[in-house]
């Protein structure tokens, strides 16, 4: 099958419009599309269907299981599902969509149907995203699943998420105290860096985490 597994680093992907995956569309249909995104910002992108910021599609026995490290998903919009990210394993013959998000933040994202932060849809396939040291706050809804089984650890999720292992308060519902909370709208507003008193500062796990943050500061 088709293979597309690039490394995308130190990029700002903004103000794009597409049918699906306006910022990035990882199409693993009958193949494998599992790139690595490091130190990237996806902001102000609009999908006229699904996955405003990123759309990961593992269909027809394909695979889309990318890795995102130190990435920001902010102010993206989907006119259907998954404003920030849509992880999709829906296909008549099944597929795999198991992306990994490490030290990523989602805020200000929206979708006309379902949640704005991240939507995970397994249906006939396998969709098991992993979120570690992540923040989902200030989106039009944070995480929603259909037959999907995300693993969420050491993370903050507005209004809480279960199960959320080693998360603040047990379910992750703790204001991360961004320097400037984005509005829930298509755009590039806000500053997702953390205030010094944020409960997320020095609160995650170092296991597998990057040595520096998005600004290049040592963790």
Image (cartoon, rainbow, N blue to C red):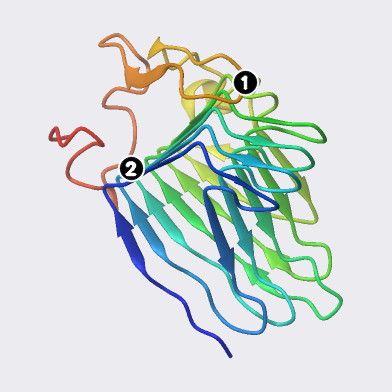
The image quarter containing residue 159 is: top right
Q: Residue at x 46, y 24 (%)?
A: 188
Residue 203 percent coordinates (x, y): 32, 28
Figure check: 93 above or below 196? below
Q: Which residue lies furthest to the right in this view?
A: 92
Residue contact at pointers 2 and 1, CB within 8 angstroms: no
Q: Name the residue that disc number 1 marks.
A: 185
The secondary element bearing badge 2 is classed as: loop
Tally the numbered discs.
2
Please give left or right for residue 27 compared with residue 115 in the image: left
The image quarter containing residue 111 is: top right
Q: Name the residue that disc number 2 marks.
A: 70
Q: Which residue is drawn at 65% across and 72% down?
A: 96
Residue 117's label in the rendered image is: none
Neighbourhood count class around disc 2 (C-alpha, 10 Å): few under 14, some 14–19, many 20 upward: many
Q: Is residue 178 visible?
A: no
Tell which circle, 2 or 1, labels the residue nearer the N-terminal end.
2
Q: Which of marks 2 and 1 is in front?
A: 1
Quadrant into which the N terminus falls = bottom right
Comparing 206 with 196, the one in front is 196
């Amino acid at each position: 099958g088709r293979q597309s597994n690039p490394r995308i680093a130190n990029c700002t992907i903004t103000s794009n419009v597409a049918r699906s995956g306006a910022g990035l569309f990882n199409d693993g249909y009958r193949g494998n599309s599992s790139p690595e995104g490091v130190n990237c910002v996806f902001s102000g992108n609009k999908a006229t269907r699904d996955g405003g910021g990123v759309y990961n599609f593992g269909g027809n026995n394909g695979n889309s299981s990318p890795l995102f490290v130190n990435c920001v998903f902010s102010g993206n919009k989907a006119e259907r599902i998954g404003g920030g990210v849509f992880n999709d394993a829906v296909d008549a013959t099944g597929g795999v969509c198991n992306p990994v998000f490490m030290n990523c933040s989602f805020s200000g994202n929206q979708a006309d149907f379902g949640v704005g932060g991240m939507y995970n849809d397994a249906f006939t396939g396998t969709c098991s995203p992993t979120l570690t040291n992540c923040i989902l706050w200030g989106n039009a809804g944070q995480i929603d699943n259909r037959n999907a089984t995300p693993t969420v650890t050491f993370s903050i999720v507005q209004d809480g998420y279960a199960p959320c292992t080693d998360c603040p308060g047990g379910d992750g519902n703790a204001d991360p105290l961004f320097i400037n909370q984005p509005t829930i709208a298509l755009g590039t507003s806000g500053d997702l860096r953390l205030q010094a008193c944020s409960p997320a500062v020095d609160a995650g796990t170092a296991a597998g985490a990057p040595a520096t943050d998005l600004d290049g500061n040592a963790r």
